[in-house]
Image (spheres, helix red, strand yellow):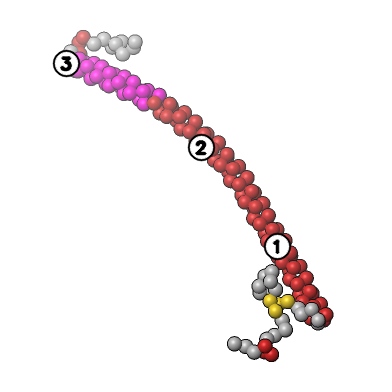
């Protein structure tokens, strides 16, 4: 154990347990300690102020990002709606064209069969065909 003569005059503060407490009899040491404490408080205050400013800047950045993303989302939703509308119009036109293609194909088939019948009749019985037959 340490002898009483080796114990330092500086003791620890009961409030924090880690800060040295200035002896009551040395005013110069008390002034230095008070100045350090004041500087530390000022430094902590400025650090907290910078931290709050950083957090506010982050919040502002995120708020701006949310606003931009919502605007982008709205624009993309409008574009998707427009594409869906155009797709529906193209599908309707495609269905109409397919129906017309089927009808025209059937008419072509019918006309082809008629021509084949007429050609067959013309080659087998040329005397029955009149020269004006093709004018209808």
Q: In the drawing, does residue 27 fall left or right of residue 121?
A: right
Determine whether label 1 and label 2 are within 8 Å by CB: no
Q: In the drawing, does residue 94 fall left or right of residue 23?
A: left
Image x and y of residue 24, in percent = 79, 78
Q: In the drawing, does residue 18 fall left or right of residue 124?
A: right
Image x and y of residue 131, in percent = 28, 12
Q: Would you say residue 117 sits in the magenta stretch?
A: yes
Mark 2, residue position: 80
Q: Residue at x 29, y 19 (%)?
A: 111
Vertical side of 85 occupied by 128: above or below: above
What is the C-alpha distance between the residues marked 3 and 2? 64 Å
Front-most of 127 and 2? 2
Please identify the quadrant where the C terminus is shown.
Answer: top left
**Residue 51 appears in the figure:** yes
Q: Which residues are magenta?
A: 96-124
User: Mark 3 or 2 closer to N-term?
Assistant: 2
- Quarter of the figure with residue 100: top left
* Label 3: few (<14), some (14–19) or many (≥20) C-alpha neighbours in 10 Å: few
Determine whether label 3 and label 2 are within 8 Å by CB: no
Q: Residue at x 69, y 58 (%)?
A: 52
Image x and y of residue 116, in percent = 23, 20
Vertical side of 10 occupied by 6: above or below: below
Q: Secondary structure at mark 2?
A: helix
Q: Residue at x 22, y 16 (%)?
A: 117
Q: Provide the major secondary structure of the magenta segment.
A: helix
Mark 1, residue position: 48
């Amino acid at each position: 154990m340490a002898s009483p003569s080796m114990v330092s005059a500086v003791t620890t503060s009961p409030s924090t347990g880690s800060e040295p407490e200035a002896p009551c009899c040395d005013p110069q040491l008390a002034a230095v300690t008070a100045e350090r404490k004041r500087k530390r408080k000022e430094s902590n205050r400025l650090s907290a102020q910078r931290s709050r400013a950083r957090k506010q800047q982050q919040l502002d950045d995120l708020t701006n990002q949310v606003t931009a993303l919502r605007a982008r989302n709205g624009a993309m939703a409008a574009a998707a709606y427009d594409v869906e509308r155009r797709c529906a119009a193209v599908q309707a036109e495609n269905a109409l064209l397919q129906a017309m293609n089927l009808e025209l194909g059937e008419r072509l088939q019918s006309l082809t069969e008629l021509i084949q019948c007429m050609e067959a009749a013309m080659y087998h019985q040329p005397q029955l065909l009149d020269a004006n037959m093709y004018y209808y």
